[in-house]
Amino acid sequence: MNKHIGSLILALCFAASGSALAGGHLAHEKGHGKGDAHHEEGPPTATAALNAIALNVADIPRAEKYYTEVFGMKRVFQYPPEGTPIEIGLALPTQPSAILLLARFSDEPLPEGKRRYGRFVIYTDDAWQLAKRAEKRGSKVRQVGGDEGPLLLFFDDLDGYEVELYQAR
């Protein structure tokens, strides 16, 4: 039963984000003066899929034990790869591409380009297209990394929540 609850929790996270990613609106957004100006350019042509939810936890080993024992999740990566992790990724065996990131509670020091934990990660085939759309709506985009490895772009939404765009190269 716990495995099903874990799958349900992750499925609800993905379902809730799907409407917004596809250009839809949540019911509570209607009638809040948003107008139609943000629809002028049409829906994005870049693909987007929720890749991860990142949680700021006080104790990574304790949180990992909880999520593995309650939901049957397994560790799929850690950062840095060697030594004591400051971030680990967990996934359900049935949903290996849906990652739960657990990061340490302290925000000092963070890996280059990351300001805090408590963000969501969007996997996309065109990070710059989505970033430019966010900039047009008031976000300031930060690039992490150079020409090698994945392209990582970060920005805050209008309420201050951090969004990470991840594009494999």
Image (tube, rainbow, N blue to C red):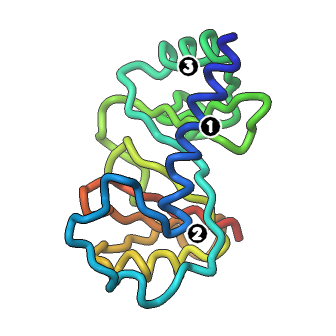
How packed mark 3 is, by other alpha carbons closer than 10 Å (few <14, some 14-19, many 20 or more), is many
What whole-number distance in Å separates the C-alpha atoms at marks 2 and 3?
Answer: 27 Å
Residue closer to the observer: 73 or 12: 12
Residue in the picture at 62% in, 81% down: 45
Identify the secondary structure beneath mark 1: helix
Q: State which quarter of the image contains the C terminus.
A: bottom right
CA–CA distance in space, label 1 to label 3: 20 Å
Q: Of callouts 1 and 3, which one flags the residue occurring earlier in the amino acid sequence?
A: 1
For disc 2, the neighbor class at 10 Å (few under 14, some 14 to 19, many from 20) is many
User: Looking at the rendering, which quadrant does residue 83 occupy?
Assistant: top right
Q: Left or right: where does residue 56 sit relative to residue 125?
A: left
The residue beneath circle 1 is: 11
First in sequence, mark 1 or 2: give its number: 1
Observer-nearest residue: 167 or 44?
Answer: 44
Q: Residue furthest right?
A: 94
Residue located 71% across and 44% down the image: 97
* Residue 44 vertical position relative to residue 167 in the rendered view, above or below: below
| Dots 2, 3 in contact, CB < 8 A | no
Residue 126: horizontal and vertical position, in percent?
61, 76
Residue indicated by mark 3? 64
Q: Which mark is residue 151?
A: 2
